[in-house]
Amino acid sequence: MTYQANILFVDDEPAYRRSFQSTLRRWQEGLEVRTAGDGLEALEVLESYPADIVFTDFRMPKMDGLTLLTRIREEYPDVFVLMLTGVDSTKDVVAAMKAGAYDYILKPFDFEMVRKSIEKILEHKRILSEEQGGGVEVSFENIIGQDQKMFEIYEKISQVAQTNASVLITGESGTGKELIAEAIHKKSPRSNKPFVQVNCAALTETLINSELFGHEKGAFTGAAARKKGFFEQADGGTIFLDEIGDVPLQTQVALLRVLELGTFQRVGGTETIRVDVRLVCATNKDLVRSIAEKTFREDLYYRINVVSLASPSLSERKSDIPLLSKYFLEKYSLNTGKKVKRISKAATKLLNSYAWPGNVRELGNAIEHAVVFCKGVEMLPSHLPIEIREMENDQGDFNLSLSSSSLADAEIALISKVLEETDWNLKKAADALAIARGTLYSKMKKYNIKKPNEHI
């Protein structure tokens, strides 16, 4: 496949620049490769020649690679940045990945790794471009994001959408689970049929069966006429049950029957109704724990969890914060009739450093708040909610001394230190690390990190 892309390579060693440029040009004629000797020169190049991908070294005069990365994420959020690093630069790599680098490549680098990284990025951009009809290349069925974790989600959506398998979407509140569910429907053969979204947590225990399965006239006080439930309304299409973990046990039995037989009865009725519905569920609860606590049926869990998709928290995809901020700024500026055009560097720094416990939803609310109070064309820190402004003086550093030769060792050291400092309280540790508790638990299992005298 022939690729077209603008690439900027930043390194203070002329030999590296010449080698990189000539090798890539031989590999693909469609690649426009420019070079710069330091971060300041790179920014000058970007002003005149926009890039799709930037490769940058860490150690350079005038402006180092980490500072350049930060500037690019602020000023060119659509650009993918890959860091070039030596094996003894673990601390730098950790900082770069937190600052929004797409990936890193060890020096002296193998051009096969460079080629694969470029191919992966450009293939993702091509797919997203097709989704948008050649327009903005940063969204997938209304999901905004170009972080690697989001590309993995897009790929899984495309794969699972073509089947009728039940899907369980897990993740924290505010991560956009409903957008993933809708994307699955839109990319499926059922896309021209109904997509019915149900917030199970908003339905009372006395009414949930009636809402899901409908009722007959006179079934209960106030049932003046027959009513079709959500499952009948979704016939032929997709029904999305959000907060499935809040469904009472009695209703879980009826859901299991629909999944197994495709049939149900309206409340107060005897007629067996058959439907053809694809089920997508979502939850922010640990359903395995709910099963142990006997508040969720194990047989239903396996029926709804044929395919599982984990919606990443915003802290797990921080490189998307500038992109999402730009999207929300444009959206709410338009909605309010204001002409807020940009976010100041100081405000961007605050947005990037905040933990976002409420995820994308909280970010959207913060930008909307800022737009409301903004009187000019630039959003400033003073326009943001107070809890975000307070972070400006509360930034801490674990002051880790990282001398290991791998990113995994650095992650193990960081997690272990935070666990000790929080007395092995997983919730507090996860909050301190700005990751989901489930993610922390998975990493502890992966790295075999155990509390003394305990097993994970």
Image: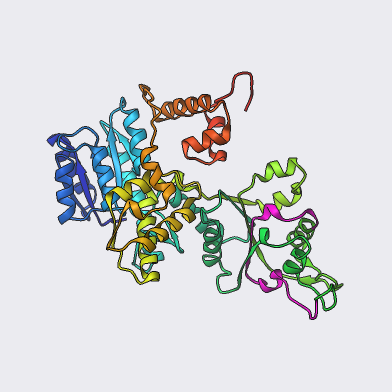
365 relative position to 338: left or right: right
Residue drawn at x 79%, y 63% is: 206
Q: Position of residue 26 (x, y in %)?
A: 20, 47
Farthest residue to the top: give it: 453
Q: Residue shown at 37%/39% (left/top)? A: 98
Residues in magenta, as a range = 223-250
Nearer to us in this view, 63 or 301: 63
Q: Is residue 340 above or below residue 101?
A: below
Q: Is residue 416 magenta?
A: no
Q: Is residue 225 magenta?
A: yes
Looking at the picture, how far across and down is residue 72, in whole percent?
26, 48
In this view, 280 is above or below 302: below
Image check: 220 left or right of 60? right
Between 85 and 367, the one lying in front of the other is: 367
Q: Is residue 403 above or below residue 188?
A: above
Left or right, 209 with respect to 331, comes to right
Q: Which of these two is toward me, 6 or 414? A: 414
Q: Nearer the viewer, residue 60 or 309?
A: 60
Instruction: Note whether residue 450 is visible.
Output: yes
Q: Residue at x 57, y 33 (%)?
A: 426
Looking at the image, residue 404 lies above or below residue 386 = above
What is the count of numbered marks?
A: 0
Q: Residue furthest right?
A: 270
* Residue 212: percent from left, percent from top: 72, 67
Task: Please state the horizontal and vertical placement of residue 140, each as a whole percent of the image.
Answer: 44, 61
- Whether residue 22 is visible here, answered yes or no, is no
Asked which quadrant contains residue 9, the reply is top left
Q: Quadrant of the C terminus?
A: top right
Quarter of the N terminus within the rendering: bottom left
Q: Is residue 140 left or right of residue 196?
A: left
